[in-house]
Amino acid sequence: MKLYNYKIPKQLGGIDSDINWYKDVHKEIWFDHEYSRYGVEVKENDIVVDCGANVGLFSLYALHKGAKHVYSYECSEEIIPSLTYNLKDTNSTIIKGYVGDKHIKIENILNFVNLPFIDFIKIDIEWAEYDLLLNTPNEFLKRINNWVIEFHDFNNNAVKMLQIIEMFSKCGFDCSLEQIHKNSNLMLLYIKKR
């Protein structure tokens, strides 16, 4: 499988950057369409936010789907050079920072983008998703039309996950939950404005 000449860091948060891991993630995004299900997908001219961009695999996918601009948030010093390389000469903006309730919040993202609405947001922020979303006021949730959120360790966070789903439902969104990787403790929540 061709990896589109991605630049990949030698070390990723203590995980050996085995090329097979990136091939698997590339396949999940580009061929299995993990971020395009239940009517939730990036469309042409969308403004997209990628929280937990890593080396930019999803950001590039969104651009390939016709996104007008992608805002890619990544906190890892080790990964930023690869992300920068992979997104050079694209309609994207890289923001170095940690997305989470105590750091960059949804409100901060909306202020940075400086638009009334964002079309699509992907959140994969390694366990920080629960507090981020539970502490986001409804007025900000309603300003993003489509969401895909990766929930980590859902077995131990089921109550929080259900609270988040209820929050979105009350704000006028349809929610679909799927355990994409059957042998993992991860769930993807697809959220679409009614």
Image: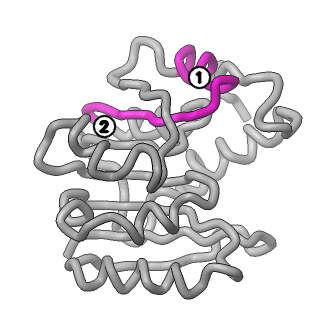
The amino acid type of the residue labelled 2 equals Ala
Q: Which residue is mark 2?
A: 67
**Start and end of the magenta stretch?**
68-86
The amino acid type of the residue labelled 1 equals Ile
Q: Nearer the viewer, mark 2 or mark 1?
A: 1
Inspect the magenta stretch and tell me whether residue 90 lies in it. no
Q: Secondary structure at mark 1?
A: helix
Inspect the magenta stretch and tell me whether residue 82 lies in it. yes
Closer to us: 3 or 89 = 89
- Residue neighbourhood size for the residue with mark 1, other residues' Cα within 10 Å, grouped as few (<14), some (14–19), many (≥20): many
- At x 48%, y 52%, the residue is 100
Q: Is residue 3 above or below residue 192?
A: above
Q: Secondary structure at mark 2?
A: loop
> Of all residues shown, which one is farthest toward the left?
116
Quarter of the image where one finds residue 127: bottom right
- At x 55%, y 68%, the residue is 188
- At x 60%, y 85%, the residue is 158
Give the image location of residue 121, x and y in percent.
37, 52
| 58 lies left or right of 164 | right
- At x 19%, y 76%, the residue is 194
Q: Is residue 1 above or below residue 140?
A: above
Give the image location of residue 135, x and y in percent.
38, 67
| 126 lies left or right of 98 | right
Q: Which residue is mark 1?
A: 80
Quarter of the image where one finds residue 48: top left
